[in-house]
Image: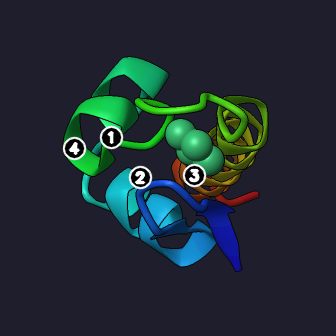
Amino acid sequence: MYVCLCKAVTDKAIKQKVAEGVSTMRELKMCTGLGSQCGKCTCQAQQILNCELAQISATHFALAKPAA
Ligand code: FES
């Protein structure tokens, strides 16, 4: 699904960037260009970014939890 129509950035591309280490909107904007024209995509992009970061955090927490 396209999140940013102006720069043709998809949700998959955002998720890929997060997997590669992007963790802020500033970094995401710099590496994809999203939000640099009309700006209508930034809210949805932020939601996807937050969701991906939360999933990564939860996964790391589960892996770091000592076995009982
Ligand atoms: S839709 Fe992303 S800048 Fe316009």
Image point (69%, 53%), residue name: 55
Local SS, label 4? helix
According to the picture, the residue beneath numbered tag 4 turns out to be: 31
Q: In terms of sequence position, does the residue under pointer 4 or pointer 3 come before the other?
A: 4
Image point (37%, 37%), residue name: 28
4 vs 1, front mark: 4
Q: Nearer the viewer, residue 46 or 65?
A: 46
Give the percent coordinates (x, y) of residue 35: 50, 33
The amino acid pointed to by label 3 is: Ile
Visual colour scheme: rainbow
The amino acid pointed to by label 1 is: Val
- Could you tell me if the residues under marks 1 and 2 are in contact, i.e. CB atoms within 8 Å? yes
The CB of the residue at mark 3 lies under 8 Å from ligand 1: no
According to the picture, the residue beneath numbered tag 3 turns out to be: 56
Q: In terms of sequence position, does the residue under pointer 4 or pointer 2 come before the other?
A: 2
Local SS, label 1? loop
